[in-house]
Amino acid sequence: MTWLTDFLTSSIGKKLVMSLTGLFLCSFLVIHLIGNLQLLVPDDGVKFNTYAKFMTTNPLIKFISIGLYAGILLHAIQGLLIVFSNKKAKGSKYAVSTLANGSWMSKNMGLLGTFILFFLCIHMGDFWYKMKFTDSLAMVTYDGVEMKDLYKRVYASFSQIWIVIVYLVGLVALALHLLHGFQSAFTTIGLRHKKYTPIIKAMGVGFSIFIPLLYAIIPLWVLIKGAANY
Amino acid sequence: MKLDANIPEGPLAEKWKKYTGSMNLVAPNNKRRLDVIVVGTGLAGASAAATLAELGYNVKAFTFHDSPRRAHSIAAQGGINAAKNYQNDGDSVHRLFYDTVKGGDYRSREANVHRLAECSTEIIDQAVAQGVPFAREYGGLLANRTFGGVQVSRTFYARGQTGQQLLLGAYSALSRQIATGQVKMYNRHEMLDLVKVDGKARGIITRNLLNGKIERHAAHCVVLATGGYGNVFYLSTNAMGSNVSAAWRSVKQGALFANPCYTQIHPTCIPVSGEYQSKLTLMSESLRNDGRVWVPKTVEDAQAIQRGEKRAEDLAEEDRDYYLERRYPAFGNLVPRDVASRAAKVASDEGKGVVKTGLGVYLDFAEAIKRYGTSEAFSAGIDNPSAAKINELGEAVVKAKYGNLFQMYEKITGENPYKTAMKIYPAVHYTMGGLWVDYNLQTNVPGLFALGEANFSDHGANRLGASALMQGLADGYFVIPYTIGTFLANDIRTPKISNETPEFMEAEQRVKDRIDQLIAIKGNQSVESFHRRLGKIMWEYCGMSRNAEGLKKGRDLIRELRKEFYEDVFVPGSADEFNPELEKAARVADFLELGELFAVDAMDRGESCGGHFREESTENGEAMRNDAEYMYVSAWEWDDNNPILHKEDLKFEAVELKTRSYK
Amino acid sequence: MKLTLKIWRQKNNASQGHFENYKVEADEHMSFLEMLDVLNEGLIEKKETPVAFEHDCREGICGSCSMVINGRPHGLQKGTTACQLHMRAFKDGDTITVEPFRAAAFPVIKDLAVDRSSFDAIIQAGGYISVNTGQAPDGNSIPIEKDQALSAFDAATCIGCGACVAACPNGSAMLFTSAKVNHLAQLPQGAIEHTKRVKNMVKVMDREGFGKCSNVGACEVECPKEISTENIAALNRYYLGAMLGSQD
């Protein structure tokens, strides 16, 4: 098995782990978004809460979610290790720095990633942790089935402007991270082609802008709706 | 001293084959016991070191660069000749041999040149196998182009970077041997002396350029592949570090230096722009295929241009003198390098130069652009194309052919050569002279070999384009691996050479003393300023056109300068650190001696031949060779006061001596 | 033109470096290195230590020159080495900051000169085709499609200057390594040892202390030979194939 350890500890192998976990997390972003957009359905949370219960209790989803947590951890830890080892490989910095060579995002993926990680902690602490490990959420019953009212919790959170701001900033960081990360992931797995790379790049830009934008609609919607209600 | 070239018996075309079939060889088990030092890792050195290691010799290779890949072979642009006859245009080994002898103005050794032509074909095969990306035809086969002074298309090329690609090929072969341990590579080590034991070359003294450490390296024989000495002129197309020191240190140990005055001055270089200029840049000779060379007819116009009041395009056709087309109607702008260079000098000396310094002529593509543009417009079916359209189409064609050269020109001069005529002037480019070697590439010092530009052997008094790469690689890949055996076969019982013997200690002391001497002078002038002054003397008195009076004066001036150097040079820093000024000082000190020998040799050669033009030996203004008196190789033994001349007479059996005429 | 130069001075690898300011009078036709020559002449006249910098061919092909000019390896001009950069690219009164290439794998020797022997080590790990002299078949027995040959040539034009590493915020040598791998990979002669070459060259590249590529693309921008990062993608692909697809 030395071939595998050789591979995974090589510079390209490590980058491949970043690339694959990154793309996997991108796919999660899409799934998560589709589920969460149910928050916008004006049914007082029936659809969303049913969905949330399914996601936290279904054995298959539970199994997949372990992969997801592993993916996040792997992506974050490996990423930070790469950032630190690259810092060492660079040695000292230049007195004059310039933006001429390479985008700001590409040079600050570690910073953006760390920021996203912090955001993720806040986000998961607020919803995921409360949902899974505490009884702090109110209970609702639909068609005789009792479940936690995550919907209400979300609306309570997003009614506070500072939380919405935190989310918006987090999503901007995500967008910037994706702007470099999406197409970079394809280069790392060696997919580059004169004809198709421009398409991948365009898709990457689209993905990086639209996904965070759609996410952003949720807290904004809640905030505005809440304000209208008062 | 009797010079024996050791040319094998037999008819010219069979000499090399017969010789390699009957020469003494060293058996593989014995090769393992023999050490070879190779100094220099350009085309000749890297290919020799790699090949000798492949054969099983223990090789130690030295370069003063940080990596073998930096050698100046890398800068060769045009291409490499080979008698492949892939174009089916009548090329053959004999034709390549003949062209090279004729191009060299009948001052090279027939047998060596014939061997060079024979080896040329194998070089291409070897390079292709190594992965050198030569230019190809659409069918996937190798492409060729024509090059100055010959009637067949035999030049293989990789865009304008043939030297780079061939050097990287040799470097890769060398790297492979370094990885196996068969070559021990010493980067940033400069050879500062040759060590002889019992009259045989057995080692070298080097300085580690990073920390100044002086080291003694012993081996059974020493191979020098240290390039040419064009930098004696200070301004040349050579790299800043190119130097004669390894060869010159060997001369100090008794090796003979042959034909130092044979210098090739390349006609198409970018003119000098100011006093600060450190080097000259060559523009490939291929430009003369389409560019027309001219100067204004009148001195008044030229002066207006020099002052910047007029530009090339301001002069009407009838006010221009296309002097090459006028003087040499048969070859026109495609006359050989030496002829084109001298004609540019004549025009500039008449006051018709077109740059601020007065030293420059036009190389004009306006007509080519118009010609190509018209033909392109016709092929595209455009009736009555406008002048602008023709220009646009023509520029595109010229760009496809010479784009990278035009771009380089614009980078350096800041002028757009598509819009205004290029300015060019001749510059020192290659030195045909070098260490005297016999057929085995062995100098008169047994065990000391010289390859590539460092030896004198194959180009006579003038080198044809695309032949330098060919010679360097032929020597390294295909000649020395065989001929080194003629010396080493007698050494198979010689144990490892010790570097602790008195000879080594003495040589080490010599080197240390010399370095201390240079540092101790602590004068007031920089090394660079001496080098620059030497260059000016060389260019003025030993340059494109020479006469007895000037050469004598030049020699005196060089001697005075040398005296001044040892009294007033300032070398900053110390001997035990990375000290580029100290490196330069030792090299310039050697140039100051070689420069004198150069003048002495040029004085002795009272004829005009190839790159050596003596004003006393002309006929109707053209160079006149004197076969009756000067058909010899001048091999010089150094002596501080009066260098001693040894002659090797040249015999021509296979070719008939003719006057080179391009009229 | 009158210029202020802010130049990195460092006696040797063991000592700390610092910037020093110099005034120099330059001509717009000078190359950048000739301007440094003028500075050094002046320093020598004052019996001071001249600025050490690497240079040789001064025509953009040997790859010796290695300095960062105002934050850009080889200066601001596209596809140009420092030796071919001319002073007309600057204005009278400019302050120019000159630093050595910075990367852990390129330790400073003195002032602006750095040690790039790690590049040689990468080539020695497999940047060659194993063919002994004399073994080669006729050159035309290996036809290569014209575009393929040109593409191999584009990768082969690397001059080994190290600007890619100097420009990379990660100090990665992927452009250098991938250019050599891809030059040989595109030729039938080079295909034979391909797998071994890819594995070994990447291994040595990592061992020499270069960083990991994160596709910033600065290398391509600063490469004086404009070598494309497509080579990097290709090397990633080759490496995956070599490590996961081979039998050993």
Image: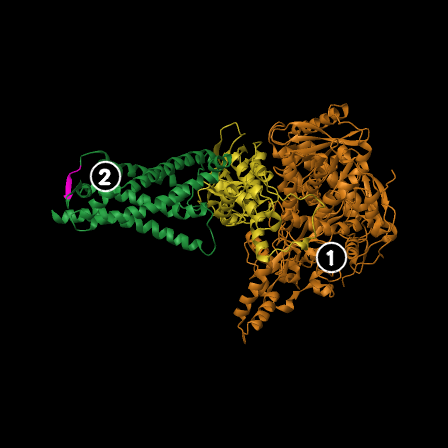
Chain colours: A green, B orange, C yellow
The picture places residue A205, in percent across and down from the top left corner, at 36, 51
Whether the residues at callouts 2 and 1 have beta carbons within 8 Å, the answer is no
- Badge 1: how crowded within 10 Å, few (<14), some, or many (20+)? many
Image quadrant for the C terminus of chain B? bottom right
Relative to B547, say whether B496 is above or below.
above
Residue named by callout 2: A127
Relative to C53, say whether A208 is above or below.
below
Q: Is residue A112 visible?
A: yes
The picture places residue B165, in percent across and down from the top left corner, at 63, 48
**In this image, B15 relative to C76: left or right?**
right
The picture places residue B509, in percent across and down from the top left corner, at 72, 25
Q: Is residue B473 magenta?
A: no
Which label was assigned to residue C224?
none
Image quadrant for the N terminus of chain B? top right
Which label was assigned to residue B339?
1
Residues shaded magenta: A137-141
